[in-house]
Image (cartoon, grey):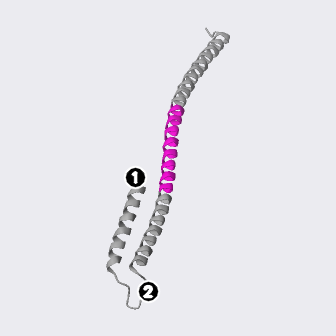
Amino acid sequence: MSRRRWILLGAATLALVAGGVLRGVRPPSGGTATGSEVQAQAQADARAEAGELLETLDQLEARLLAGRQTVSLWTELSARHREVSELACSSLELHAQAMAREVAKSAKRSAELKRRRMAAVELARPSSR
């Protein structure tokens, strides 16, 4: 059963119990209210209270659904962030490896250029022998 039905069932039970209790209650001496009038008033009060309870339940349900949507949103954002972070890390790793290869090539070129310059200087220098 849904919650709304349980609440309606509870309100109906409350109205029946209140009606049964009020049947045994006699109006004060000199009172003009009859048993049926008191019972009708009790049922009207019970219906009004049931309506208020249903309204409160509807408000709670709306808050629950809004909270559920918020949790769903944050879960989706978290999953997206995780995916983007993984992609960024793998991209950064590849970029760092490429940079390291370029630095190694540059160092090798610099060493080769230095070796050539030294060789050229040695050839240009007159032999002292």
Q: Residues within 10 Å of mark 1 (few under 14, many from 20)?
A: few
Residue placed furthest toward the bottom: 30
Residue 108 location, quadrant: top right
Is residue 65 covered in magenta? yes
* Image position, residue 117 (x, y; %): 64, 16
Residue 71 in the image: x percent, y percent?
Answer: 48, 48
How many circles with numbers are drawn on the protein? 2
Q: Amino acid at mark 2?
A: Thr
What residue is shown at x 52% (from left), y 38% (from top)? 80
Report the span colored magenta: 61-89
Above or below: residue 25 compared with residue 106: below
Magenta stretch, overall SS: helix
* 45 vs 122: above or below: below
Q: Secondary structure at mark 1?
A: loop
Q: Is residue 33 above or below residue 71?
A: below
Closer to the camera, 50 or 24? 24
The reply to whether residue 126 is in sight is no
Residues at circles 2 and 1 in contact by the CB criterion of under 8 Å = no
Give x and y (percent) for residue 14.
36, 68
Image point (50%, 33%), residue name:
86
Residue 75 on the magenta segment: yes
Give the residue at mark 1.
2
Give left or right: position of 70 versus 35. Answer: right
**What residue do we see at 37% from left, 60% from top?**
9
> Which kind of residue does numbered mark 1 sit on?
Ser
Mark positioned earlier in the residue sequence (2 or 1): 1
